[in-house]
Amino acid sequence: MPIPWRENWRKCTVRAGNLLPSLLFYGANHHNLLPLTSYCNFNCIFCSHRQNPPAIDSYYLPQRKPAEIVESFSYLSPREKIIIGESATKIIEGEPFCYPYIKEVLTELRRQFPRTPLQITTNGSLLDKPLVDFLRKIKPLELVISLNVYPPFLRNKILGDRHPQRTLDRIKSLKTFGVSFHGSVVALPHLTGWEELKETLFYLERVGARSLRVFLPGFTRLAPSSLVFNLSLWEELDSFVGEFRKALGIPLLLEPSFLEDLVPRVEGVMRGTPADKGGMQEGDIILALGGKKIKSRNEAFEKACKEESPLVTFSRGEEEKRVRLEKGAGESPGFVVYQDMDEFTRDRLFNTLNNHRHKRTLVMTSQLAFYLIKGLVEAVNIEGGQVRVVPVPNSFFGGSIMSAGLLVVEDFLKVIKAEKIEPQVIIIPEAPFDFKGKDLRGHSYLDLQEETGASLILI
């Protein structure tokens, strides 16, 4: 039987080179990430690593000793949630519980970070009783269960799950054992139908998921035709989520979302949480925390998490309400919002635009962020400004890929040349670039500055 990661990723440039330690420490320091393994015991047909174009700088993790992983603990922050099993760098993340020494690593992690919340993303297949008993002892912990498909007869075909009923039974047991989890589902209605998607979401709600996220599947230009779908599916999923949310009874979010502003609208409230006990509801608009005006979703959630028993002012229709959320500092308030833009990034964008207001400024965004950034720039209304906002398609990856993190230098150059733009200042997202300033093809953002002659600013 072929090794799953070799079969899935043989078209990629995957290696464990000299840069790997730096990537590990950078991910820990900047994102509070703790990668454990690149091995996965599933073989999902929609896995992005199967469709990557050639010459992508991706890195798989060799089998490491626990001491090597513990070495990166010093780069983690105790003030932020430590995240395991979520891809956010050039390192290929596998199934965390496939790492044979995960108990030893988590035990030491909890010893060094006794109060820091841990988040582990997993397919749930390896969560047997001894492991779940262990996880109960290292709280605060939340699992993100990537279920994706519920019907057992489809799980082997779609996910490569060789023991589908056993996996489902193990996920079902989490509620019994008191282990908190959230659910995530890559939506495949073009392959399995809308009823299957409903069935999967209802199953997760029944077995105790506190919230759910539905993801638009990503495919590149190299994906097999069977996986390709019309991008109108995104709008269909948005309508589906909006209609299905109330029937489900727990927070349900779509990723990526359709955001055009920073209005801190509550998308849902988790049962039994401070926000639930305080009477907050989906649709409430958060106005202030502790009397201080709130300007974005990120700010609302982060400050509500950070503070002890914050006083929340919010509007519901024409009515303004206040409630004190009884909680400890660092604990979740229980309301759910979409992620938009943090305060630092927003202020930096506004300050940059103001500082260069007398120059021809080009703001380049991902397709996903275009309407949000365009709305923010228009709202600033800088006097004398010559600002243009343009979306940058992910031409290199192609397909349904629309995110900033998967843009490459040539995507930006292609738009500039096609539009015949001659800006003096170019503002681009920093998400596509690693700590050396290189994209997924190994090209530096400085190449863009050299090609255009414009001042380049990453935000």
Image: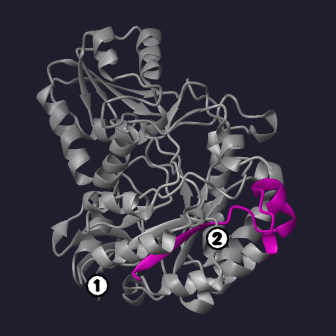
Residue 314: where, in percent of width, then height?
31, 73
Residue 75: where, in percent of width, then height?
26, 57
Dots 1, 2 in contact, CB < 8 A: no
When asked about the image quadrant of residue 457, the answer is top left
Q: Which residues are magenta?
A: 139-165
Q: Which residue is mark 1?
A: 323
Residue 24: where, in percent of width, then height?
37, 49
Amino acid carrying label 2: it is Gly
Secondary structure at badge 1 equals strand
Please tell me which of labels 1 and 2 falls first in the chain.
Answer: 2
Between 267 and 187, the one lying in front of the other is 187
When asked about the image quadrant of residue 448, the answer is top left
Q: Which residue is mark 2?
A: 124
Does residue 253 show up magenta in the picture? no
With 116 as the anchor, is 92 left or right in this view? right
3D distance between C-alphas at marks 1 and 2: 37 Å
Q: Is residue 124 above or below residue 215?
A: below
Amino acid carrying label 1: it is Val
Residue 356: where, in percent of width, then height?
15, 25
Does residue 156 show up magenta in the picture? yes
With 289 as the anchor, is 274 left or right in this view? right
Between 14 and 167, the one lying in front of the other is 14
Q: Residue at x 71, y 75 (%)?
A: 202
Q: Identify the colour scheme used.
A: one colour
Q: Residue at x 76, y 68 (%)?
A: 150
Q: Residues within 10 Å of mark 1 (few under 14, many from 20)?
A: some
Q: Residues within 10 Å of mark 2 (few under 14, many from 20)?
A: many
